[in-house]
Structure formats: structure tokens, C-alpha cells
Amino acid sequence: MNEKIRIGIIGGSGLYNMEGLSNVTPVTLDTPFGHPSDEYVVGTLEGVRVAFLPRHGRGHRITPSEINFRANIYGFKLLGASHIISVTAVGSLKEDIHPLDIVVPDQFYDRTKNRQSTFFGTGLVAHIAFANPVCPDLGSLLSNTAKGLGITTHKGGTLVCIEGPAFSTRAESNLYRQWGMDIIGMTSLQEAKLSREAEICYAAMALVTDYDCWHEDETAVTAATVVENQKKNIVNAKQVIRTIVSKIPQARACLCPKALAGAIMTDEEAISKETRERFGSLVDKYFE
């Protein structure tokens, strides 16, 4: 596909399609890191060319640990995306973050064990800066857009990313609260890290479905609770996405487009032809 898109949208639990797209083209991609979760749906939304990908596949076939995060993000890179908006279901770890609220986290804590969260290795080494894992410009725009629509939105906060697919034990949930975590989910962290390596601006729209299992006045989180509240959340999420896409500027003043500048450690002479081809879309501009 020769046409380039500008904005990628990752749909989480409950968000498997995007209404309002016109001039739609399904795009199936293969990447050096395998197959993405599903085909990308490329179309025009509010005058902007975007690509939509359901993180868990249509019909929710893929568990959080089975998601090929590398292929998903690399696919967006191949399509030309400069920005990714991720929609993800989360539980609240704070009394004042209520179900049906939106959180735009600016920090992550990784509690996963079995995930591939870097493109690098196997002949090419790079160490990105990740102190601030979310694009500040995109995160602010996302938060302000949601607030402008009258949706209760929390700007900032830490998302603790767990392995899943089971929800937390009560002991774990209370420990995360003691650590100062704000919300809990099973994705996002890997997407944020890989987007930074791909020099794509990334922000997550975390849709609160429950209070996890720490809240004594609420029943413990179940899949049924998550699904029911997420149906309501998705209405808001789609409204935010339709509103924000035309507001995202083409010029980027953040540091995301230069994330690999100075991060590549491997000498160019030590990189094989096969390795260069594998990482081409990520690093070619640094070896020209």
C-alpha cells in the first residue's frame, strides 16, 4: 500500500470497529516481527486518513499475553503513522477515579513477565529514554478533548500493567494502591515502549470499568462487569476520537520523532545486511 496514514487507533476490549470511516480499505500486513492482531482498517475520519486496529482481533480472540505488540506497532510504522491513540480498559485503584471515567496516564509500571517489549536485539542494540513514556503533546490534547466533551477525565497518573488474563488478587490490588498506582490494566505499557522506539507519538485513553477488587463496598471485578461498563465507555471513546483526529497537528514539537537519536549503540559496520533489512523502517535514516 503506497498511501500513508497519519494517525493510528488501537481499539481495546469492546472497541473492534470505528464507525464514521469513509473510503475504507482493509490492509493486511506482514512484518519482520510476525503478523499483527488483525487487518488494519484504513479510512477517512473527519477528513483525516487513519488506520484502525483491534488489539485483541475481531471477536476478541487474543489474550493480552498473546498480543504481538511488536507487529502491531511496526505495522503502524509501515503505514506511516506519526501518532497512535490507544483505547484500553482499566480498573481504578483510587476512590476518586470512578467507573466510566477516562484517565490519560503519563506513567506506567510493568508487572508483566512474558511480553516482547522491544524491537531491538539480534544484532542491533538501542537504549531509548523512557522516563516520560507518553507523548506530552498528544496526552494533553487527548485529555483536553475529552474534558471539552464534558467527560470526567483525569490527566496523568500511573497505570500498572499486569500479565493477566486473570484479574488481580485482593492482596495484589491493595499492594498496588500502597505503591501509589492509579489504574490497572493488561496492555498499554508495551505499546508505549514500542511506539517510542518507532518514534511515534503515543497516548492512551484508559476507560475505567471497575474498582478492581480492593474496594470493600463494591463487588470484585468480573468479566461481565467489565463488558457492561465498557459498552458505555466506548460511546465516549468514539466521540473523543472523532473530535481529536482533526486537531492533531502534522508538525511535531515533541521529542518523539528523535527518540533513536543517540540511542543506537551498535557500530554500523557490525550490522549485517539482514539486520538492516529487518530494522529498516526504524533506523534507516540514522545510517544514510
Image (tube, helix red, strand yellow):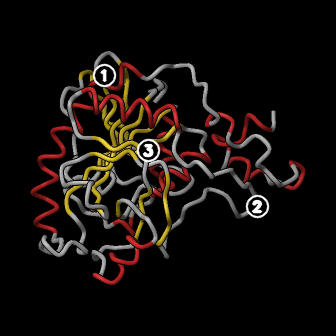
Q: Nearer the viewer, residue 105 or 214?
A: 214
What residue is disc 2 on? 123
Residue occupying image coordinates x 19% and y 55%: 99
Name the N-terminal-most of marks 1 and 2: 1
Tell me the number on the disc at residue 200: none
- Residue 126 locus on image (x, y percent): 73, 54
Q: Amino acid at mark 3?
A: Leu
Residues at badges 1 and 2 in contact (C-beta under 8 Å)?
no
- Residue 257 locus on image (x, y percent): 63, 33
Tell me the number on the disc at residue 44: 1
Q: Residue furthest top?
A: 47
Q: Amino acid at mark 2?
A: Gly
Name the N-terminal-most of marks 3 and 2: 3
What residue is disc 3 on? 29
Q: SS for tag 2?
A: loop
Front label number (3 vs 2): 2
269 sits to left or right of 280: right
Q: Amino acid at mark 1?
A: Thr
Q: Is residue 81 visible?
A: no
Q: Nearer the viewer, residue 93 or 84?
A: 93
Q: SS for tag 3?
A: loop
Q: SS for tag 1?
A: strand
What is the spatial separation of the Cα atoms under label 1 and label 2, in whole angstroms?
39 Å
- Residue 227 locus on image (x, y percent): 14, 59
